[in-house]
Image: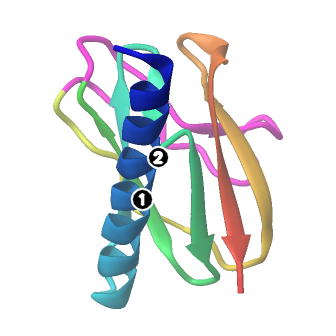
């Protein structure tokens, strides 16, 4: 696939993920981050104060979503394949980086909480 097509496709996928997140927010449902083999999708998520996020494991191995402050801000615990975390509510603005305790910081993501 030519680079221009890959970039355009990546942009469309990003826009669709943002639209899906906005729809979930407007309905008061948690926003879902999907755990894939060694990544989170989306890797960077923007939410509003008061929104909740759920991590859904669609991989073959156990994963976690653990805040970079050793899990003090949030810690999902082990999420087995085909399972989801309990919702994590973000009540204050900020940038919250996280990673998978099982696979280390090479599997990481960020939740940005805005107004």
Which portion, as a residue range, is magenta? 59-81
Image point (46%, 15%), residue name? 38
Q: Secondary structure at mark 2?
A: helix
Residues 95 and 68: in front is 95
Q: Residue 86's x, y, as percent?
A: 36, 56
* Residue with the mark numbered 2: 11
- Name the residue located 60 percent from the left edge and 20 percent from the top edge: 101
Identified at 43% across, 64% down, the residue is: 18
* The C terminus: image quadrant: bottom right
Say which residue appears at 40% left-offset and 62% top-offset: 87
The answer to whether residue 49 of the structure is visible from this angle is yes
Q: Position of residue 81 (x, y in %)?
A: 22, 24
User: Residue lying farthest left?
Assistant: 82
Quadrant in which residue 94 is drawn: bottom right
Q: State the separation of the CA atoms marked 2 and 1.
A: 6 Å
Q: Is residue 78 visible?
A: no
**Closer to the camera in the image, 83 or 115:** 115
In the image, residue 16 lies in the stretch drawn in magenta: no
Magenta segment's dominant SS is loop
Viewer-side residue, 106 vs 61: 106
Q: Position of residue 37 (x, y in %)?
A: 36, 14
Write down the quadrant of residue 70 in the picture: top right
Image quadrant containing the N terminus: top left
Q: Which residue is mark 1?
A: 15
């Amino acid at each position: 696939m030519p680079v221009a097509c890959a970039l355009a496709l990546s942009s469309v996928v990003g826009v669709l993920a943002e639209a899906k997140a906005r729809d979930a927010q407007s309905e008061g449902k948690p926003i879902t981050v999907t755990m894939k083999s060694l990544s989170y999708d989306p890797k960077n998520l923007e939410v509003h104060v008061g929104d909740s996020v759920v991590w859904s494991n669609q991989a073959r191995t156990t994963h976690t979503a653990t805040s970079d402050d050793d899990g003090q801000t949030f810690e999902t615990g082990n999420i087995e394949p085909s399972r989801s975390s309990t919702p994590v509510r973000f009540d204050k603005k900020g940038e919250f980086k996280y990673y998978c305790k099982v696979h280390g910081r090479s599997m990481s993501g960020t939740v940005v909480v805005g107004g």
